Amino acid sequence: MPAVQETIDQVRSIDVDQYKYGFETEVEMEKAPKGLSEDVIRFISAKKGEPEWMLQWRLDAYKRWLTMREPNWARVSYDKVDYNDIYYYAAPKKNPAPKSLDEVDPEILKTYEKLGIPLREQEILAGVEPQNRVAVDAVFDSVSVATTFKEELKKAGVIFMPISEAIREYPDLVKQYLGSVVPVTDNFFATLNSAVFTDGSFVYIPPGVRCPMELSTYFRINEKNTGQFERTLIIADKGSYVSYLEGCTAPKRDENQLHAAVVELIALDDAEIKYSTVQNWYPGDSEGRGGIYNFVTKRGDCRGKNSVITWTQVETGSAITWKYPSCILRGDNSRGEFYSIAVSNGKQQVDSGTKMIHLGKNTTSRIISKGIAAGKSDNTYRGLVSAHRKATGARNFTNCDSLLIGNECGAHTVPYIESKNATAVFEHEATTSKISEDQMFYCQQRGLSEEEATALIVNGFVKDVLQQLPMEFAVEAQKLISISLEGSVG
Amino acid sequence: MLEIKNLVVQIEDKRILNGLNLTVNNGEVAAIMGPNGSGKSTLSYVIAGKEDYEVLDGEILLDGQNVLEMEPDARAAAGIFLAFQYPLEIPGVASMTFLKAALNAQRKARGEDELTTPDFIKRVNAAATQLEIPKDMLKRALNVGFSGGEKKRMEILQMALLQPTFCILDETDSGLDIDALRIVSEGVNALRSPDRSFLVITHYQRLLNHIVPDTVHVMSAGRIVKSGGKELALELEANGYADYRESEAA
Ligand SMILES: Nc1ncnc2c1ncn2[C@@H]1O[C@H](COP(=O)(O)OP(=O)(O)OP(=O)(O)O)[C@@H](O)[C@H]1O
Ligand SMILES: [Mg+2]
């Protein structure tokens, strides 16, 4: 059919990506020697001024990692990563640990300006309702360059700071919780991260406190041949609440770059954590050159009774995505939620989903996943729902929908269900659809261009998930999805 | 004014329109009747610009402008509207959102300003009230789960909102109950004006009692085989298409 043919041609002809964040910043960087060794780990630990126990923790992880193999079960294929051809630490030479924004390299400030990430509190305050403010931790390659609203948050008892700082200032908290959700030995990439992690955010919300503003971290990879290994740890103590946003971008480059993060969430009794991600790492060009390898371990532990953890993700970037934000529903009556939009275009490969591990009684979980594949991309949802022997009354509802744009992409759904408790009730729905030519024609007959029609239909498709995002973020995400799909129709 | 001259169209090597000629003047309501499979819907799709059809010969001019060279959305902006025989569903997109996107896309294409939200809502509400469409329906995803008759009403609502100059109604009456037929017809009649014309495709005289046509054309085997005034429809109702089917063989 002509329309389909045209779509294919159009997709074939995308030569330059629509990626808007692909610029590079010129800053002088200090790097660890290339490659991975005990010495490099000691170098990182020394740069961060870490106590001895932290160094030991890293070295143990490294020893373990040397015995591990890269996983190959995901539906992705890529050239082998040479782990000795990567820089594991890169920090701005001028003042790697600025005390205030005035000390931050102006080039870096400009970078965040260009990315639309406000770092000056006064600017954020102007014209924004207090309850709509967002505190930002800005991580540039291996270090945090700025954290806003720290003082004000401190007044509420909230700790929000780079994890490298928390290791020095709150060693007991960090020791107690770090690696308690994602053990050092969890998987190849998590173990690597444990050995070499450089920065990320640390959040602690004290009992009964509702965090007075949204917290967010913005990750930027800038330096060439450098991996980013961030580590985020969020603890919501009894009866507290926090909403946390994560964003990320990287310059366009021909080589692939590795991003292997670990995020751990802990919700104690009656606490709630909402964790939202807009992942927009550089996806590579239409030929599949370059782009970020996004191999990430994200896990939340509903450790206390009645606790709630919600993961919401909008994934548009990365050449390869390997990511399964999960919930361990340990506390009785705890609830886990996973809302995901994964968009792939060009030659992107996405293998993403979630795990809901029901351990406690009357635990509930909900999974809504929307995969959109265009171009020659591959988009897989992989999800596990399991109920432990003791998880009486566990309930899950899963809905996985895939939308295909064009004829050369693929969508796959791989659900695993394991129930060891007869009272568990798991429901699973899945659909795969295509934007039909008749739908397109109908929209065009009403005056919409093919691109407008696609955007409208896609927005309808992802609506249930977009509604889960904080308002401002939802608008951003909507734009991002349209941009990612630009050029996927004729 | 819409002029169709010697239109020859095929799909997948099957000839469907065979040298069709038809002129609809400004302000005119033209009815097309004809047996199943004679090519009525095909004609409406070709006018609106659906891709699958191969135009082998002939032309379609809207106020002298060659329509066949335009994309479907450009034709819509130029004033062509098709109320579908089978309206499509758009899951997750509220009818209201769809209407606004469509109206603003057309306005943009014509170089007009976007409507403000209050202005837009005023217009939609007025049209919905006239067509007795409950407001709740406008919040639902477009056509999803709508009954056959509700879908047809929604088509006319869109027409009323978009204010096209050349309106094609493809069997809008099928699926409408007696009251709905009256309401929809009144909606259409309210839009009749000296600078707007209609092509009304139907199988039944009863619609033409409500929307009284200026001309009636009989289509058979991809051609207009007879044209006349409104009385032609009554004649067809009485005698069927037997006479015209013979002309197919001829
Ligand atoms: N994609 C297609 N492939 C082959 N034949 C087609 C295709 N689309 C339409 N046709 C044929 O073209 C002919 C005309 O169809 P069309 O829908 O225009 O008829 P119609 O006059 O609208 O009929 P009805 O009164 O039943 O609505 C029919 O024989 C139909 O089967
Ligand atoms: Mg028809």
Image (cartoon, grey):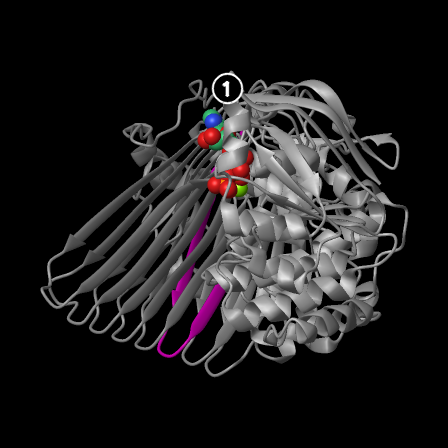
Graded by Cα atoms within 10 Å as few (under 14), some (14 to 19) or many (20 or more), the crowding at tag 1 reads few
- Whether disc 1's CB lies below 8 Å from ligand 1 is answered yes
Query: Residue A410: percent from the left, percent from the top?
Result: 42, 30
The magenta segment: A257-274
Relative to A485, A332 lies left or right:
left
| Type of secondary structure dominating the magenta stretch | strand
Relative to A179, A313 lies left or right:
right
Q: Which residue is drawn at the image coordinates 76% and 47% (left, top)?
A: A112
A67 w.r.t. B80: above or below: above
Q: Does the rendering let one see residue A58?
A: yes
Quadrant assignment for the N terminus of chain B: top right
Q: Which residue is drawn at the image coordinates 63% and 34% (left, top)?
A: B43
Q: Is mark 1 on a helix, strand or loop?
A: loop
Quarter assignment of residue A425: bottom left
Number of numbered discs visible in the structure rendering: 1
Which residue is denoted by mark 1 in the rendering? B12
Quadrant assignment for the C terminus of chain B: top right
In the image, residue A269 lies in the stretch drawn in magenta: yes
Query: Residue A449: percent from the left, percent from the top?
Result: 71, 40
Relative to B200, B90 lies left or right:
left
Q: Which residue is drawn at the image coordinates 27% and 49% (left, top)?
A: A384
Q: Mark 1 lies on which chain?
A: B
Front one among B52 and B95: B52
In the image, residue B96 lies in the stretch drawn in magenta: no
